[in-house]
Amino acid sequence: MHTRYYHPSWWGRAEPIHITTCPRYPGSKEGTILDVFFINISSVSENGGFLAGSRHSLLHNLKFKNVDLTYKRWTNYTGGLYDYRPGCQDLVKHKTGGMMLEQISSLEIDNVRMRWSRGSLKGWDVNPLLF
């Protein structure tokens, strides 16, 4: 797959994988996400993966196997933002990692490759995984 930035009013920031338990509306109860497997996935994207549980609902038992992620910028939209819309928060300024992970219980990573295209490191964190 290929993912790219579109207009900032669109939800999402070109993540190849995006999962969150953030409630859609204030006061809503968080749902549960568990036993999600990402197997045999290849992507070229302008952003890293985004996996965020919430304070009252962790993500449980996620597995990545045979995943190949290439990061490359080709649009002129601003990077360095995480998009929690339409739930927990709006856009949050943050250096970008290969995968942003928060509020997760049980994560298995097997044969995952992350690489950055030449000239595409500006605005990225040096650590591929951000917790």
Image (cartoon, rainbow, N blue to C red):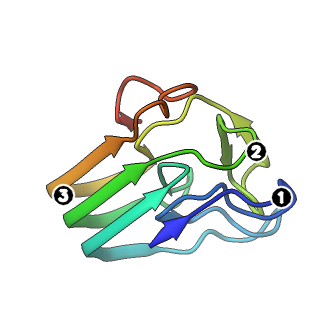
Q: Which mark is residue 36?
A: none
Q: Which mark is residue 108?
A: 3
Disc 1 to disc 3, C-alpha distance: 33 Å
Residue beneath label 1, please?
7
Which structural element holds mark 1?
A: loop
Q: Quadrant of residue 54?
A: bottom right
Quadrant of the frame with the C terminus: top left
Q: Quadrant of residue 1?
A: bottom left
Q: Earlier in the sequence, mark 1 or mark 3?
A: 1
Residue drawn at (75%, 64%), measured in percent from left and top? 11
Q: Nearer the viewer, mark 1 or mark 3?
A: 1
Disc 1 to disc 2, C-alpha distance: 8 Å
Residue 28: image location, x then y, percent: 75, 70
Q: Earlier in the sequence, mark 2 or mark 3?
A: 2
Residue beneath label 2, please?
77
Q: Amino acid at mark 1?
A: His
Report crowding for label 3: few under 14, some 14 to 19, many 20 or more residues within 10 A (C-alpha). Answer: few
Q: Amino acid at mark 3?
A: Glu
